[in-house]
Image: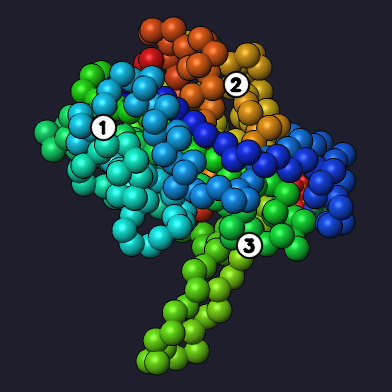
Amino acid sequence: MKLLGTGSALPRHCVTNDDLATFLDTNDEWISTRTGIRQRRVLTDETLQSLAERAARGAMENAGVTGEEIDFVLVSTVQAETLSPALACDIQAALGIKCMGIDINGGCTGFIAALSVAQGLIASGQARLILVVSAEALSRFADWTDRSTCVLFGDAAGAAVVGEGDGVEDIRFTGEPRRDVLCASTPPGNSPFAINPAPAQYLKMQGQEVYKFAVSHSFRDIRDMLADHDLQPENVDFYLLHQANMRILEAVRTRLKVEPERFPHNIERTGNTSSATIPVLLDELNRSGALKPGCRLILNAFGAGLCTGTALVTW
Ligand code: UT7
């Protein structure tokens, strides 16, 4: 499988750290020094579906493919606007696509999980050209009264068109079941048979636990991927890590002993947009002209589960 084109979309509305300080006991200094985040985009009157469509259209134009050529749509999302049909089906009409579409919830690792599913579909001959979209609206289930979590998140969509080729060299995942450290729930429904249904819960997170997991696991996964492919850290042009905290990126980068230029970031502008962070960053790099043919990339994400995903890609 190889990546043929990328796209991304952010909501119009920008929320700065100072904006948050008008209704939370927080300030720009705490948020920017602890996380690197200065602003994030959040949905107001736009829909997640419209963001997903914009990102997908960008990726299809960038890849030079039409809707008729796409034969599978995979969307990674923690929660779409409708449970059924999947967002992957809902975005098809606007893009002239008619094929099977499914949503995948891999938490923040969702884009790499969707790439892996796409690789399997292509390898087995079930699809030739696949649209992969990561679309996330964490503003909808963050607790906007909890300063320790809501300041971290933003909304975004990123997309890629993938097809047959040999650009994606390796994809791997790990998991450690730890529901307690990062969890959000959907409404319990109204079944008359449910006994003591748990109420819906906004996103809850033990930040330091996730932080420690992220630094240790990202470094380990990247180190192992490099070693298994006989690569040194400097043989990789760009490390595209899940944008959760600038301090996490810096901790992994310094352990790998590579220059800051190899660790692009946009967290200062977008916040943590779950599975959308990597494809949005990838699209920004692509459109800036930084990705030359043959460029070697490592994608690495961690998140709810807890789980991690790492991909070695040649552009
Ligand atoms: O996508 C994957 C999911 N998420 C992550 O990867 C997040 C990983 N974790 C992190 O990025 C960091 O742990 C956080 C940014 C969430 C927190 O940073 P920290 O350096 O671990 O801070 P902390 O939780 O230890 O809190 C330090 C202090 C506390 O006050 P006390 O107890 O020392 O008096 C907090 O109450 O900072 C306080 N605090 C805040 N102060 C101002 C927490 N949030 C805020 C805030 N503004 N927004």
Q: Position of residue 144 (x, y in %)?
A: 71, 60
Q: Which mark is residue 170?
A: none
Can you identify the residue that label 1 sits on? 67
Q: Earlier in the sequence, mark 2 or mark 3?
A: 3
Between the residue at mark 2 and the residue at mark 1, the CA separation in whole angstroms equals 33 Å
Tell me which amino acid carries mark 1: Gly
Question: Which residue is found at the position 43% from the left and 11% from the top?
Answer: 295
Kind of residue at badge 3 = Lys
Look at the picture and state if 242 lies above or below 314: below
Q: Which residue is mark 3?
A: 204
Q: Secondary structure at mark 1?
A: helix
Q: Quadrant of residue 259?
A: top right
The residue at the point 50 percent across, 89 percent down is 196
SS class, disc 3: strand
Q: Earlier in the sequence, mark 3 or mark 1?
A: 1
Camera-side mark, 2 or 1: 1
Quadrant housing residue 271: top right
Residue 263 is tagged as: 2
Give the residue at x 39% y 27%.
Answer: 59
- The answer to whether residue 237 is visible is no
Residue situated in front as seen by the camera: 244 or 43 = 43
